[in-house]
Amino acid sequence: MSDNGLLNGKAKRLNLGGGGGGGGKGMEYLLAGTLAVIIVGSLGFTIWKFFGGKTGPSGPTEMHFKCLKCNAEFELKPEEIPQPSEQAMYGPESMFIDCPKCGAKQSCLPMVQCPNPDCKKWYLPEATKFYATNPAAAPTEELKDVCPYCNTDRIQWYREHRPRR
């Protein structure tokens, strides 16, 4: 067996001073100080994020809807949107809400905002209307998501303007 200093309790101090002579204490203090700053910084950042250090809105502040019966457009905050029943949660009924303007049941669908910075108007895509009212229909290329105000194809716009990695 070899005589290893760690096994018989005779661990040597690591000399980080370089050059073989002293100076190791200064380097040890520098490393300990750096480690302390990293730990305190990480802990501070974690506490800040945990207790509300938000940099922006975490989700939409309001959603836009359009009634298919009276064509009324309105906005609701996420907490104001009625939750669908458990039975309707997975069907097309989960997209619909009741209209607060005309009172029609299950007649309102969520709108989307045009991504074009020159437009930014809200609209109800034709594909959304079609698939909400015809849930068994097969997908088709003819139903594009195009803004009726500026003719921007929303899907194509996002393909062309997505952030590059």
Image (spheres, rainbow, N blue to C red):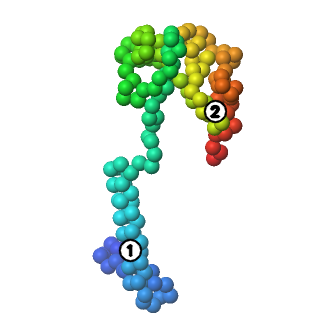
| Residue 39 position by quadrant | bottom left
Check disc 1 and report its element: helix, strand or loop. helix
Label 2 close to label 1 by CB (< 8 Å): no
Q: Nearer the viewer, residue 42 or 93?
A: 93
Residue visible at 39% across and 24% down in the picture: 81
Furthest-bottom residue in this view: 21
Query: Quarter holding the N terminus?
Result: bottom left
Mark 2 or 1, nearer chain start: 1
What residue is rendered at 64% in x and 33% in y? 119
Q: Position of residue 84 (x, y in %)?
A: 38, 18
Q: 25 or 114: nearer the eye?
A: 114
Q: Which residue is mark 2?
A: 119
Q: Amino acid at mark 1?
A: Gly
| In this view, the mark in front (2 or 1) | 2
In terms of image quadrants, where is residue 33? Answer: bottom left
- Amino acid bearing label 2: Cys
- Coordinates of residue 104 in the picture (x, y in percent): 43, 9
Regarding mark 2 in the picture, which secondary structure is present there? loop
| In this rendering, position of residue 116 left or right of residue 5 | right
In the rendered image, the residue lying farthest to the left is: 9
Q: Is residue 95 visible?
A: yes
- What residue did someone put label 1 on? 33
Q: CA distance from mark 2 to mark 1?
A: 54 Å
- Residue at the (50%, 17%) spot, across then down: 72
Count residues near mark 2 (Cα–Cα under 10 Å), then give few for <14, some for 14-19, many for 20+. some
Q: Residue at x 44, y 11 (%)?
A: 102
Query: In the rendered image of this protein, does residue 48 appear above or below residue 25?
Result: above
The dot on residue 57 is none
Task: Say which of 13 and 7 sits in front.
Answer: 13
The percent position of residue 108, horizontal first and vertical second, equals 48, 16
